[in-house]
Image (spheres, coloured by chain):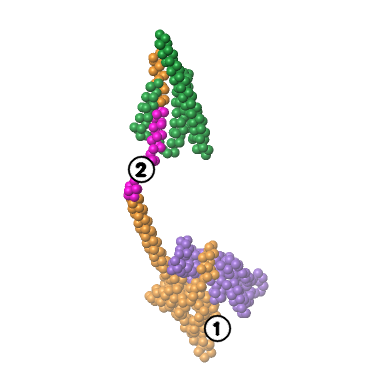
Amino acid sequence: MIEQELADGPNELKDLVDTKITLQKLTGELPISGEGITLTLKDASYIPSKDHANQYIVHDRHIHQTVNELFSAGAKAIAINGQRIYRNSYISCIGPVVSVDGTAYPAPFVVSAIGDQDILDVSLNLKNGVIDMLVQDNIEVTIEKKSKIEMHAKDM
Amino acid sequence: MLLPALFLLIGLLLGFMTNLSIPEEYSNYLSIAVLAALDTLFGGIRAQLDSKFDQQVFISGFFFNVSLAALLAFLGVQLGIDLYLAAIFAFGVRLFQNLAIIRRLLLDKYYLFKKTKKNNDISTKIN
Amino acid sequence: MKNVFTKHKLMIGLVCLLIGFMVATLFNTNKQPDSRDTRDTWEIRTALQEEQKVQQNLYQEIAEAEKTLIEYQEQTEHQQIISLKESIQELREKAGLTEIVGKGMIITIEPIFLNEELQEYPSINAELLQLFINELNASGANEIAIGNQRIINISPIRDVNGKVYVNNSSIGNLPTDIHIITKDIEKFRDYIEVSEINDYFALENVTISIREQEKVVLPKYDGAINLQEVHVGDIPEVGES
């Protein structure tokens, strides 16, 4: 990477290179990694036969809410089942499959977020927060703190 | 006796006139070879004076000594030992020995010549 | 007898010739270095001056070469800066950090009042807005701004005390304008018009109206971007600086 070599050079160049790298990290032109947390959303394993099965599976809105909660808690980047999402990404759940920008992933749905682990964890676990809501919707949620989450660069 | 001296002179003249010189790193070999050649030459002179000169010995000795000396010097350089010093020492000692013998032989001859001359004088006087 | 004598003498003569030749050659060889140093002071001084001249010329050449090298480096540095700035500008546009103008549409989310007396003032929630944005993205929106908040890669939409916050600032009460830039307006419009999002909006006593515009202006994202904890790929040091 020539930019990284140049980063050792004069200050102006260094600043520009830093800016460029930051922007590339933001736009997904570079693969990124960092500490963060992962949430695994699973359909309820026990579905009482009387009830409607729809009430026990993960819907788009659960993922949307989780993602937005994570962003508002300062997540730097979020990936769903390993695919990083961008501002014009669309997520839809079709039965047991989640589709991110047209690529389908099977359940369980793993939302990984790079950012401050503690802040993310606390904001997810707020009273009447996202976790509470998910649990209320009979979704099995597991949170894991990861010291290194990797995300690929956007396919150009 | 005159002819070899003449040829020696011609060789010297030829050498100086062609102004031939060899690279610095090979001059050591040449100097050793020259020493060997001189040794052979004086050996030859001595043998001549002893009247036991053998042409074969002289010629083979010349070439053999010269090449052996050069080879020894070469080997010395390759091994990092100053072997050419051994050659210089051996040839030098022999050179001086030969020179000494030549000197004595010449002196002997001179005395012999004087004696015979005297005898001749006496005999003529008698006569 | 005479024949042998001649041959005998000739052989010795030849050897003597060789010896003479060798001695002469050796003499020549050893003599040569001496001849080099037979210059007098004046000659040496002249030679020295000449050498110094050559040296000076060389120094000059080196200086020129260095100058060219520095010029080249500076130039390439300059060019590097220019191309870096260009790519940064491009990236800023891509990231949504610049104001952008393009063909697209403005979708206004408006309240509908069926029964003004009984009805609360209609509002939307974050969930609905998220779904709507998702729907917009699915239908091929390129750039979106809600109110004056540009949606970028890390924009959160969520409820805070009953108000919808985008980029951590409230979008206020309805009606709200959503500015969209898209390539294929027709397709986009068709997609949105048949989307079930309309039903969801209707449930909240809200409707959307779409106005196509030749020129839609999207504001830039004005928050701070801080990605210090995010490292580049497998090279952990880069993000640190």
Q: Does C203 sit above or below residue B97?
A: below
Q: Amino acid at mark 2?
A: Thr
Tell me, what hue is chain A?
purple
The dot on residue C125 is none
Q: Which chain is orange?
A: C
On whether residue C73 falls in the magenta region, the answer is: no
In the rendered image, residue B38, in percent from the top left (x then y), is placed at 45, 28
Within 10 angstroms of label 2, few (less than 14), some, or many (20 or more) residues? few
Name the one closer to the observer, C84 or A91: C84
Label 1: state its secondary structure.
Answer: loop
In the rendered image, residue A14, in percent from the top left (x then y), is placed at 46, 67
Q: Which residue is mark 2?
A: C38
Tell me, what hue is chain B?
green
Residue sitting at x 41%, y 78%: C211
Marks 1 and 2 close (CB-CB < 8 Å):
no
Q: Chain of mark 1?
A: C
What's drawn in magenta, residue-wise?
C17-46
Q: Which residue is mark 1?
A: C162
Q: Are marks 1 and 2 on the same chain?
A: yes
Within 10 angstroms of label 1, few (less than 14), some, or many (20 or more) residues? few
Residue sitting at x 42%, y 72%: C185
In the rendered image, residue C198, in percent from the top left (x then y), is placed at 50, 77
The picture quadrant where one finds residue C107 is: bottom left
Residue sitting at x 35%, y 53%: C52
Question: For the view shown, which residue lies furthest in the bottom direction?
Answer: C117
In the rendered image, residue C200, in percent from the top left (x then y), is placed at 52, 78
Question: For the view shown, which residue lies furthest in the top direction?
Answer: B127
Q: Amino acid at mark 1?
A: Gly
Residue sitting at x 36%, y 32%: B16
What secondary structure characterizes most of the magenta part? helix
